[in-house]
Image (spheres, helix red, strand yellow):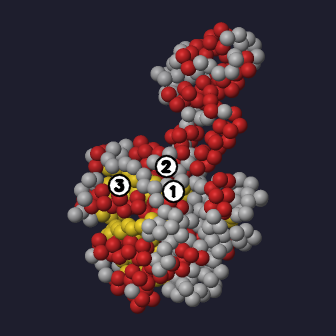
Amino acid sequence: MTLEEKVKTIICETLNRGAEEVTPAADFNNDLGADSLDLAELVMKIEDEFGSMIDGSIPEEDTANLKSLGAIVEYLKSKGVADEL
Amino acid sequence: MKRVVITGMGVVSPLGCDLNTFWNRLVEGTNGIGTITKFDATEYPVKIAAEVKEFDVNAFIDPKQQRRMDPYTHYAIAASRMAVQDSGINFSEENPWRCGCIVSSGVGGISTTEKEVLVLAERGARRVSPFCIPQIIVNIASGMVAIEHGLKGPNYAVVSACASGLHSIGDAMKAIKYGDADVMLAGGAEAAVSPISIAGFAAMHALSTTNDDPAHACRPFDKERNGFIMGEGAAVLVLEEYEHAVKRGAKIYAEVGGFGATCDAYHMTAPAEGGEGGAQAMIFSMESAGVNPDQIGYVNAHGTSTPMNDRIETAAIKKALGEDNARKVSVSSSKSMTGHMLGAAGAIESVVCALAVKNGVIPPTINYQNPDPDCDLDYTPNAARERKIDFCLNNSLGFGGHNACALFKRV
């Protein structure tokens, strides 16, 4: 499974959206109807999945930029997570 | 002062999840109590409860929203939707600022609290869900019901333990009576069949331990009663200003004619000997309705099946109505079948009262076998009875010494 596929699965589950809606550029707030609580939960699930690869938690100042599937994938890659899991 | 009537009702209960099923089973004397299935209670001192078993949450709330709410709020939303449907009211045609909601709970999202405390202990503060607080607060059901129906008028929850549901009816009735609202959704919801809740109530020795015979564990007013049985569910009633209801041609179940509330100011959990506080709530309720004790045909008792409640409530009924009237009135405990739905109890028992006066039928107290000299009223033992009732009382008494009594009137 690729990194993008894994992140996409987490997003679909957390936001209860279909795979076709969760495109790399789809904005969580504007396109996928997420509110601030959804985003807090999403970050938590990303940390649960990738925490061991990125030194645990995602700092508060970084979470504000994680607005789409593409943004999360880029962020994780920048922290050293590989494309292929 | 405005008159207040009930025009719709919805229930989620151990006796069924629609109004007709609930009423039919109640009148037939159906037991709703069984062995706990929501968690493994094998090692618990109490292994029985009245669980909601026929509830399809997917019929009421989409999966994403479900995850954001505790089951107590699921029950509240479902009961409110059925009540609104039953009343035929269309809130999009109403002034939203004149439509409110008071749906309460005794302990709110206690199973979520329990779950998240374990997350905190095992995985640390950063793993606690962002939905923890909005799921556990006792007022969230009222807030979510308002969103469901677009109600922008008075909205809050009342917390008075086992009297929460009835205080909600009382407050909602007053909001209409004093002209602050035209329509109020009022009721209670509870989902407390959870490990911490069963363990906690069991530690108080408040619960029945007749684990090997759940069908006969709850025996209000019987000499062999030995504690209450935890129930769960919700009931929501549509309360409406009388002229408003008539104008739209609504069916009317009953009028909420009076309400009284007092406190024992005596002990944190035990009722005061003699039942003075409960009696005074009944007296205030009758006075506020302008009704005399000899006009009361039915008392839906709090009737928990604890040794102390049933004895002291019997004394309270005698004190409030007078010895002679108390002997003529029909009394019954719905909890013999539904278990004790805590913060939803006063609400679902208001549903029972409304249907009892409308249908002229008094549901029974089941499992009544052994007379207790301290409980010597007519408890409608084991079989429903036809009786035309003009006025009835509904008692709810809560830990903390809270006493509430509502009076319902045939319309």
The lab-note entry on whether marks 1 and 3 share a chain reads yes
Callouts 2 and 1 close, C-beta under 8 Å: yes
Q: Residue at x 51, y 56 (%)?
A: B106
> What amino acid is labelled 2 in the image?
Val
Sequence-wise, the earlier of marks 1 and 3 is: 1
Spot occupied by residue B6 in the image (x, y as percentages of width and height): 36, 63
Give the residue furthest to the left.
B1
Note whether residue B347 is visible: no
Sequence-wise, the earlier of marks 3 and 2 is: 2
Spot occupied by residue B285 in the image (x, y as percentages of width and height): 34, 72
Q: Nearer the viewer, residue B369 or B280?
A: B280
Q: Nearer the viewer, residue B272 or B207?
A: B272
> Which residue does the numbered mark 2 point to in the structure image?
B138
What's the mark number on residue B97? Answer: none
Q: Chain of mark 3?
A: B
- Quarter of the picture containing the N terminus of chain A is top right
Spot occupied by residue B393 in the image (x, y as percentages of width and height): 40, 74
> Which residue does the numbered mark 1 point to in the structure image?
B106
Taking B301 as reference, is B177 above or below it? above
Note whether residue B218 is visible: yes
Q: Nearer the viewer, residue A76 or B145?
A: A76
The lab-note entry on whether marks 3 and 2 share a chain reads yes
Q: Nearer the viewer, residue B180 or B149?
A: B180
Q: Quadrant of residue B241?
A: bottom left
What's the mark number on residue B184? Answer: 3
> What amino acid is labelled 3 in the image?
Met
- Quarter of the picture containing the C terminus of chain A is top right
